[in-house]
Image (cartoon, helix red, strand yellow):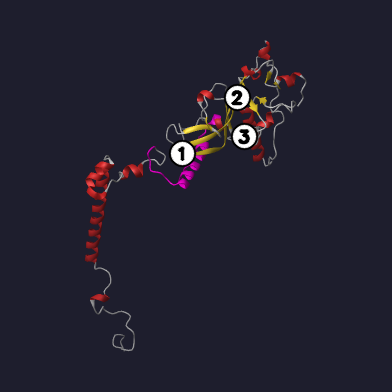
Amino acid sequence: MSYAANPNLFPLIREPASRWERTGFSSTQERWFNVTSILLVVLFLGGWAYTLVRTSDMTPEEIAALMGDAGPIAPFSRQVTAPVLAPGAPPIASRSMDEVLDRVAEQYMAQLDLEARGQSGALQVHILDPGETLELPATEEAVPEGVPEGEVLVQTPGGPASPTEARPGIWNVLLSMGNATREVPNLSVITQVPMSQKRSGRIGNFMIGSWPAETGRAHANPIYATPKGMIEVTRENQNTYLSKHIQLRDFITKGQENVWPKYVVVNPRVVDKIELVIQELELMGHPVTNIFAVSGFRTPWYNARGGNT
């Protein structure tokens, strides 16, 4: 008995009984459908590109006149393609601005040049000589990517610093964009007190003494040269981190415990060397914790009195 002749079996394959049971296109219909779809897409893209090109240099008023009663519309290309931080750019949500500032601050830290980061990459301060212009530490780029020229400032918590009024102190580094600011993490700019403020071996009440060249005993080794300035250390700023592990207070000379402010000389290369030693110890499998320096700087007065630590 053949399959087709048995009315009791459900037919697995049969010809459609009507056009409604037919599915899909024939090969000819599918080919025409594809050609038509491609032509429509090309037509829409061409019209879109033509509109963008035509309106790219038009003012909102010209576009409004072109559209009649539709009302003024800002040029699409100016709103969408302009940098979000550029002057006149459309406002963005505060949360988006926070995200942008966070990214730029991180990028700025990553772009700091070797002098600012040190060989160890762990330095966290940029020390300026007296009289140097108060400005951001140099980066490998002129400014962090995405930040308009002139929109990067060094500021204190109380406001922007004037380059002509770079008073001694420790300054925060803030990236300023529009009305928003973001503090660059783990980075400070230090301006020093000029050595010319020393009188009779003191700055204020803090006894410092004299370097050999100041007493007519010039030394051939440049490390004994009179420094151009000193860092003012207060009760409030003594915990500032000079690097990942070393704090400003680690350079305070012993003695004169009740005299504030104090004054120290910090050579960033010394701090950098300490960080390199720490990194080498960790690479050798020796975890380094709770490290600090003792009297990282000793005043000439302390040395002359027989200081031994």
The residue located at (55%, 31%) in the rendering is 116
Residue at image mark 2: 192
Amino acid bearing label 1: Asn
Q: Which residue corresponds to mark 1?
A: 179
Secondary structure at numbered mark 1: loop
198 left or right of 11?
Answer: right
Q: Nearer the viewer, mark 3 or mark 1?
A: 1
> Tags 3 and 1 in contact by the CB under 8 Å rule?
no
Mark 1, residues whose alpha carbon is within 10 Å: few (<14), some, or many (≥20)?
few
What residue would you read off at disc 3? 243
Asked if residue 8 lies left or right of residue 165, the reply is left
- Tell me where residue 263 sits by quadrant: top right
Range of residues picked out in magenta: 87-115
Quadrant location, the N terminus: bottom left
The first of marks 3 and 1 along the sequence is 1
Q: CB under 8 Å between callouts 2 and 1?
A: no
Question: Which mark sits nearer the N-terminus, 2 or 3?
Answer: 2
CA gap, disc 2 and disc 3:
18 Å
Counting other residues with Cα less than 10 Å from the Cα at mark 2, is it few (<14), some (14-19), or many (20 or more)? Answer: many
Total number of numbered discs in the rendering: 3
Closer to the eye: label 2 or 1: 1
Q: What is the secondary structure assignment of the residue under circle 2? A: loop
Q: Position of residue 252 (x, y in %)?
A: 69, 28
